[in-house]
Image (cartoon, rainbow, N blue to C red):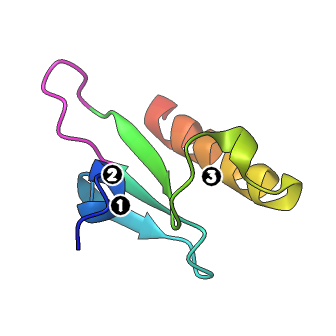
Amino acid sequence: SMSACELCDTPGGERLHDDPQGLWRIVLAPEPDYPGFCRVIAGRHVREMTDLAPDERARLLSAVLACEEALRE
């Protein structure tokens, strides 16, 4: 059954990396106007980052920052 959440129901882009514990995945998003645009997508449905537990937020933020560093290089 469909959850009505596009990021839960589809990969969301070309998969680049999966968190070993399944907390998140990193995808290269299909955004023609924004080449290199990546998404860090939670492994379970959450509406906002503030819905995550503090330790999950910290790990997710680390992934976001790692993406930014890689893109800047």
Q: Nearer the viewer, residue 73 or 58?
A: 58
Q: Is residue 61 magenta?
A: no
Q: Nearer the viewer, residue 40 or 73?
A: 40
Expressed as whole percent of the image width and height from the top left, the position of residue 26 reads 43, 56
Q: Amino acid at mark 1?
A: Cys
Left or right of residue 19, residue 59 in this image: right
Expressed as whole percent of the image width and height from the top left, the position of residue 71 reads 45, 36
Q: CA distance from mark 2 to mark 1?
A: 5 Å
Expressed as whole percent of the image width and height from the top left, the position of residue 12 reads 27, 52
Q: CA distance from mark 2 to mark 3?
A: 22 Å
Expressed as whole percent of the image width and height from the top left, the position of residue 27 reads 34, 53
Mark 2 in CB contact with mark 1 (< 8 angstroms): yes
Circle 1: element type: helix
Residue farthest toward the front in the current orientation of the protein: 1
- Of badges 1 and 3, the one in the foreground is 1
Vertical arrangement, residue 32 with respect to residue 28, above or below? above
Boundaries of the magenta span? 28-35
The residue wearing badge 1 is 8
- Residue sitting at x 48%, y 35%: 73
The residue wearing badge 2 is 5
